[in-house]
Amino acid sequence: DSGVTQTPKHLITATGQRVTLRCSPRSGDLSVYWYQQSLDQGLQFLIQYYNGEERAKGNILERFSAQQFPDLHSELNLSSLELGDSALYFCASSRAGQRNQPQHFGDGTRLSIL
Amino acid sequence: QQQVKQSPQSLIVQKGGISIINCAYENTAFDYFPWYQQFPGKGPALLIAIRPDVSEKKEGRFTISFNKSAKQFSLHIMDSQPGDSATYFCAANSGNTPLVFGKGTRLSVIA
C-alpha cells in the first residue's frame, strides 16, 4: 500500500461529459502529480502541484484542469470528454517540490468513455 | 531529448533465472533513475532508484547498473520468481523536469 488514495476506481461516462477524479497524497507529502496511462502512449505526466500551487505542466489538454486544496488533496477535472480520453489516470505524491525525489503512486482511476 | 528507451518489450524467464531490462536516455541533465513495478489493476510501485554518483545499487534480488558515459541503466532481477511477473518501467528526470517513463517491459517468470 503506497498510502496514496484515489477515487473512484472506475468511472464510465459518455462523450461530452465532465468528471472529477480525486487524490489524497501520502501523509506528509506536499507534491501531487497526475499521470495518464494509455496502451499507445504509456505513462504521461500531466501536471504537478506543490503545497497548493501549480508547479509544472506536462501534456495536459486545455479541457483538463486540476487543483490542490489546503488539506493537500487534489482533484483532476476532465471536461468535454472524448473517446480518446479513455485511460488510466494515476496520482502520485512526493515529500517536496523537486521532481527528482521518490514518487509514490495510487492505484488509479480507470476512465471509460462510451 | 526527453525520451527514455526501454527494451525488451516482453521477457520470459525461467524460475531461478536472471531477468535483465535495459534503458537508455538522452538528456544528460537527468540525475534520478527509478524503476517501477506494476501489477494488473495496480499503480506503479517504486522498486529501486539510483543517482549517477554510483554505478550500482542492490536491494535484495534487485540490482540497478548505471553507465553514465553510455547513458544507459539496467535492472537485474536475480533468482527470478513467478511472483515477479509484472510490467517494469524505467524512468528518469532531474529536479526541474518531469519524470519520463520508458514504454515498459512485461516480464513473465515461468516455473
Image: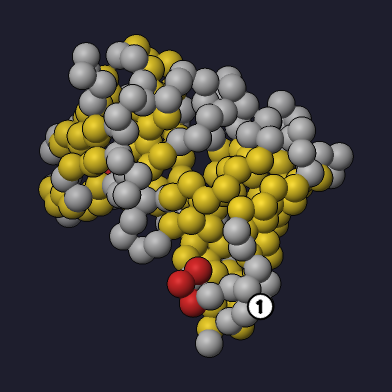
Amino acid type, mark 1 = Gly
| Residue B8 shows in this picture | no
Q: Residue at x 59, y 73 (%)?
A: B80
Q: Is residue A60 left or right of residue B110?
A: left
Q: Secondary structure at mark 1?
A: loop
- Visible residue check, residue B110: yes
Q: Residue furthest right?
A: B69
Q: Residue at x 33, y 37 (%)?
A: A91
Q: Position of residue B101 (x, y in %)?
A: 55, 44
Instruction: Please tell me which residue lies in front, B102 or A60.
Output: B102
Percent position of residue A27, x then y: 30, 29
> Is residue A92 found left or right of B93 in the rendered image?
left
Q: Quadrant of residue B104?
A: bottom right
> Which colour scheme appears in the figure?
secondary structure
Q: Nearer the viewer, residue A56 or A31?
A: A31
| Residue under the point 65% across and 68% down | B78
Residue A89, by quadrant, is top left
Neighbours of disc 1 within 10 Å: few (<14), some (14-19), many (20+): some
The residue labelled by disc 1 is B17
